[in-house]
Image: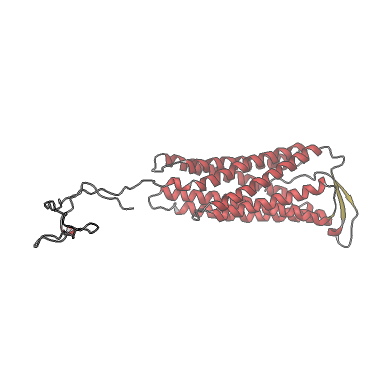
Amino acid sequence: MAPRRGDGGYSSGYYNQDNPWRETIWLSLDGYQGRELFLAQFAFDIFSLVAFITFLIWACTIRNRSLPLKGIMCALTSFICSQISTIVWASLYIADAEVMMYYMITLMLRDFFMVMGICLTFYVFWSLIHRFLGLLAPSGKPHVAVTIIHYLLFALIFVVSLSESALNITFWVGVVIADYDLIMLPSGKLSAAIYIVYWLLSMEVIGWTFFVIKKAGSHRFVSRMPAVALMNAAVCWFAVCFAWAVISIRYTLIVSDAWPIYLDLVRAIIQFIFWTGTYTGILLCCAKWHRLGEEQSYAAPQYEAQYQPAQFPPRNTAHVPKGNYPPVQHQPYGSAPYQDYAAQPHTHSHQVSPR
C-alpha cells in the first residue's frame, strides 16, 4: 500500500451525535497552499488509472492460459479499484462538495485494494520465476524448496498486509467517531515495517530474474526477450517499493511527522512511471513467452527412389480413338505388384527427429 496521503484540503461541518457517519462536512481546496500540487497529483492518479485499464485489456488478449494471467488480471483490477477510490476522494475536494462522513469509506477501499494489488503482484512475479526455473531444470519443474518458500512468503505478506489494512481502516473509523484510542493505534509503525518487507522481497525478485537471465544465456532459449522483460519489470517494481520504504522510514520510524506537501506529488509521479514499467515488462514477458521454446522447423525428408520403375517399350497409341485414354499397363505376369519395404533394411542416410 502506498504511504497514506494527506488530507489535501480544508473541511468544516457539524457533528451528529446520534450517528457520526451522517455528519455533514464541506470539502474544499480554498486557501490550501498546495492546490497546484494537489491538482497535479490528481492528474497523475488519473494517468495511473488509465494505464491499469490499458494493461487489463492487454492481459485479456493473451491466450497462453498456462501463465498466471488470472493473477495478473486480479492484481490489475485491485489497482484499478484503488485508483478509482483515490480519484473519487480527491474529486470531492476539487468540486467543493458537501458530503457526509461516509466519504471516508473511499479511503478504506483504497487501502484494502492497494494491499490486494501489491500481494498479487508478488504472486505473479514468483509464478513467472517458477515457470522460468522449470524450463531451465532438467526435470521441467522448479526446485520444491523454492516453491514452498515463495508460497510461505506470499501467505505471510498477505496476512500481515491485511492486518495492516485493518489497522488503517480502524484509524479512519476512529477519525469519524472521534475515538482517540483508535486513532493512537500503532498503524503507522506496522505500515513502515510492511514497506520494508516489500522492499526486501522486491530485491529477492530481482535476484531471481538476474539468475534466470544468466542461466538463459547458456541455455537453448531461442530468445531471451521474455526473461529480459521480466527483469525490467522487477527493477521497476523494486523502485516503487524502495520509494514507499524510504518515505515510511524517514517520516514514521526516524521522525514521526507529516511529510512535505510536495512529496505526495513526487510519490504519485514515481508510482505512475514505475507501475507502468512493471506491468509493461510483465505483460511483454507473457506475450512473448512462445519465443522461449525451440523453433526448429522439420522439413519433410526427401527419399530417393531405390527401385527403378520397369522400362517398357513405347506404345503406339495411334489406334486409340480420340477422346479415349489408353488402357492401364499391367505388371508383367510373375512380378510382384508391390515392394515390401517393411521387410527390407533401412538405408536412409538420415533420420527424422520425433516432434
**Residue 237 in the image: x percent, y percent?**
59, 43
Corner quadrant of residue 174: bottom right
Residue at (50, 43) in percent of width and height: 209
**Residue 173 in the image: x percent, y percent?**
78, 56
Q: Is residue 226 left or right of residue 55?
A: left
Q: Is residue 260 visible?
A: no
Q: Is residue 19 visible?
A: yes
Which is more toward the observer, 86 or 104? 86
Residue at (76, 50) in percent of width and height: 88
Give the residue at the far right of this rendering.
14
Residue at (89, 56) in percent of width and height: 15
Give the residue at the far left of this rendering.
334
**Residue 194 in the image: x percent, y percent?**
65, 48
Q: Is residue 297 left or right of residue 308?
A: right
**Residue 177 in the image: x percent, y percent?**
83, 57
Residue at (58, 56) in percent of width and height: 155
The colour style of the image is: secondary structure
Corner quadrant of residue 5: top right
Tag count: 0
Which is more toward the observer, 34 or 177? 34
282 w.r.t. 345: above or below: above
Which is more toward the observer, 146 or 223? 223
